[in-house]
Image (cartoon, grey):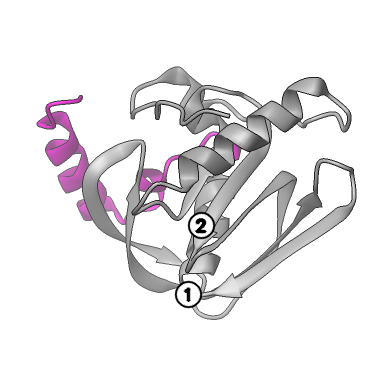
């Protein structure tokens, strides 16, 4: 188990769709342990595998002290009228921008044993489920910003010391 370094905006692994995990793959258990250890740090709501440089389809979450993971997640349902929410990303550190997210989301996948897992929720959980599945599909949250907000975000990100 290890807390892994977060890949930052501009790293090509963040723009690539992640491959499904084969149940029984010996790498999967180690990946899940690292995802959980890394998401446990304060201020972290979710973490996709590609954010730690692994192109496999899994993410961990830490919502109101509830910590877990899901393998091969699929965004199965979103509902409600999309709302503007303040959103940040570990791969774009120090920035929060308003973007539209559905107020409810449901994700289906499996655990390490291959048993079905379903995660759902509203508020921060809904936001995290959408955000992390976007990551696994190779999309960063800034892609979903409204045009003017995205232009301003890119100007600000380019000034960041880590960029």
Q: Is residue 88 visible?
A: yes
Residue 137 lies left or right of residue 116; in this view the side is: left
Which residue corresponds to the image point at 80% horizontal and 57% vertical from the top-left?
Answer: 117
Q: Residue furthest bottom?
A: 80
Query: Residue 75: x, y in percent?
Result: 68, 56
Q: Between 88 and 39, which is closer to the camera in this rendering?
A: 39
Q: Is residue 154 magenta?
A: yes
Query: Residue 148: x, y in percent?
Result: 21, 53
Secondary structure mainly formed by the magenta segment: helix
Tell which circle, 1 or 2, labels the residue nearer the N-terminal end: 2
Which residue corresponds to the image point at 33% horizontal and 29% vertical from the top-left?
Answer: 9
Q: Between 113 and 79, which is closer to the camera in this rendering?
A: 113
Residues in magenta, as a range: 136-163
Pair 1/2: label in front = 2
Q: Could you tell me which secondary element the residue under label 1 belongs to?
A: loop
Residue 29 lies left or right of residue 104; in this view the side is: right
161 in relation to 87, above or below? above
Query: Residue 138: x, y in percent?
Result: 54, 34
Which residue corresponds to the image point at 13% horizontal and 37% vertical from the top-left?
Answer: 155
Which residue corresponds to the image point at 21% horizontal and 38% vertical from the top-left?
Answer: 154
The image's mark for residue 123 is 1
Mark 2: give few (<14), some (14-19) or many (20+) Cα within 10 Å.
many
What residue is pinned by disc 2?
A: 62
Q: Could you tell me which secondary element the residue under label 2 belongs to?
A: strand
Query: Residue 51: x, y in percent?
Result: 48, 32
| Residue 136 falls in image quadrant | top right
Q: Between 59 and 159, which is closer to the camera in this rendering?
A: 59
Label 1 – label 2 distance at C-alpha: 13 Å
| Residue 28 falls in image quadrant | top right
Residue 104 lies left or right of residue 94; in this view the side is: right
Where the N terminus falls, by quadrant? Answer: top right
């Amino acid at each position: 188990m290890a807390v892994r370094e977060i890949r930052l905006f501009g790293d090509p692994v963040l723009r690539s769709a992640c491959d499904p995990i084969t149940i029984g793959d010996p790498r999967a258990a180690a990946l899940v342990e690292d995802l959980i250890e890394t998401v446990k740090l304060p201020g972290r709501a979710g973490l996709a595998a590609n954010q730690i440089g692994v192109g496999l389809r899994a993410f961990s979450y830490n919502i109101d002290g509830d910590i877990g993971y899901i393998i091969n997640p699929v965004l199965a349902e979103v509902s409600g009228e999309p709302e503007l929410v303040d959103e940040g990303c570990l791969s774009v550190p120090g920035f929060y921008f308003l973007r539209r997210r559905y107020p409810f989301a449901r994700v289906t996948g499996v655990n390490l044993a291959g048993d079905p897992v379903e995660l759902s929720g509203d508020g921060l959980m809904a936001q995290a489920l959408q955000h992390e599945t976007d990551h696994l599909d190779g999309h960063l949250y800034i892609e979903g910003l409204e045009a003017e907000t995205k232009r301003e975000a890119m100007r600000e990100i380019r000034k960041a010391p880590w960029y």
